[in-house]
Image (spheres, helix red, strand yellow):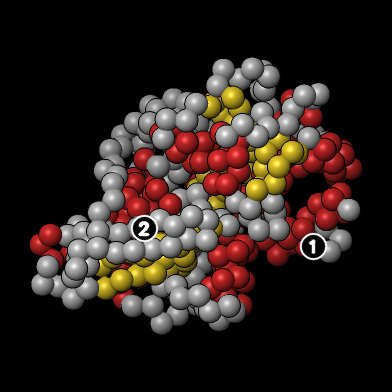
Amino acid sequence: MLSRRARTLTVFAAVLTAATGLSACSSSGSSKSGSSAGAGSTSSSNSSSSSAKSTSLKLVAYSVPKPAYDALGTAFAKTPAGAGVSLAGAYGPSGTQEKNVAAGQKADYVAFSTGSDMNKLEQAGKVAADWDAGPTKGIVADSVVVIVVKKGNPLGIKGWADLIKPGVKIVTPDPASSGSAKWNILAAYQHVIQTGGTPAQAQAYLKSFFSHVVSRASSGAVATTQFTSGTGNVLISYESEAILARQKGLSLDYIVPDQDVLIETPAAVTKGAPKAASDFLSYVESSAGQAIFASHGFRPVDTSVKPTDVKGANDPSNPYPVVQKLFTVGSLGGWSKVNDEFFGDNGIVTKIEK
């Protein structure tokens, strides 16, 4: 497993098959879960473990990876470590989920859209200070920002510059609640810098970009629902969300811009969680777990996993193309600096939106 820096340069290609599905696993054979963004269960089963002690793990996560975690729970239950383990999943906007857990919502395993949300949970004493000390720095899945358009791309969108042309109506989440929104904004701003522009020009672009926004959803998943229901004509989203939407049969196209950000999504077990939570995290980080993430639209952090048959991708045989200019939050100084510079009381975005 390579470092985060090495992963940003990895070419994803080769072979993957991952089983997906949803079944229940507990001594009674079923599990229920709820979500602030729509109730849904993440449960798993193992017929050979009927005599094993049942353990129910409470998973609290941002909304986009729910289908992946459904499949991960099913697959984990078929392993020796997962025998008798069920997952009860609650999904919603990353920032909201972090606040809920910090305020006392029960969670054994947490997964967020940004590292800053996990850092806040660390500061609240809910996860260990070394949550990001491993080989992947606590990151369990990657993605990039994409521009989603109506089927056939009727506006002829090719990249960031086209989003501020007349007639473009953008749907993107609200950075006050959504980690996805922060990634989108950083990518939009930084594309100007990556093409030789100045900070002043990047801010001018961002101001124009916001003038085209017609809806700010609470989360990336809600933004996708709004867009596919008829709101706007361009959606800024995760590559994984666009691929999952097409796997569900939704009619849309997406463009991976030449200038982009590596979306790094973390996960951790909470303090006092049962051993099964750590076992599940280990499975998620394993090549088997990474293959499941890859089949659900996420770029795997384990570079030994090389997917070549991802349904819904622009090119299923090469689902995760190399981005010409790809930056990371680390290259910008980390989340603390980024949040202050862009989203703080005197941040770039805050000033633009006044």
Quadrant in the rendering for residue 201: top right
- Kindly identify which residue carries mark 2: 41
Between circles 2 and 1, the one closer to the viewer is 2
Q: Residues within 10 Å of mark 2 (few under 14, many from 20)?
A: many
Q: Could you tell me which residue is drawn at 74 percent across and 38 percent down?
A: 214
Instruction: Say which mark, if any, is on residue 132.
Output: none
Give, as a three-letter code, the residue at label 1: Gly
User: Where residue 83 appears, x then y in whole percent?
Assistant: 19, 66
Looking at the image, how many numbered discs can be counted on the residues?
2
Left/right of residue 160 with respect to residue 48 in the rendered view: right
Quadrant in the rendering for residue 95: bottom right
The relative height of residue 260 versus residue 92 in the rendered view (above or below) is above
Left/right of residue 166 with respect to residue 18 in the rendered view: right
Q: Could you tell me which residue is drawn at 35 percent across and 53 percent down?
A: 70
User: Where residue 129 appears, x then y in whole percent?
Assistant: 54, 77
Q: Could you tell me which residue is drawn at 79 percent across and 29 percent down?
A: 164
Could you say which is closer to the camera, residue 206 or residue 331?
206
Could you say which is closer to the camera, residue 153 or residue 32?
32
Quadrant in the rendering for residue 107: bottom left
**Tag 2 near tag 1, CB within 8 Å:** no
Residue 254 in view of the camera: yes
Give, as a three-letter code, the residue at label 2: Ser
Judging from the image, what secondary structure is the residue with disc 2 in?
A: loop
Q: Residues within 10 Å of mark 1 (few under 14, many from 20)?
A: some
- Kindly identify which residue carries mark 1: 344
Judging from the image, what secondary structure is the residue with disc 1 in?
A: loop
Residue 319 in view of the camera: no
Q: Could you tell me which residue is drawn at 58 percent across and 57 percent down?
A: 93
Mark 2 or 1 closer to N-term? Answer: 2
User: Where residue 169 appears, x then y in whole percent?
Assistant: 73, 31
User: Where residue 153 appears, x then y in whole percent?
Assistant: 61, 20
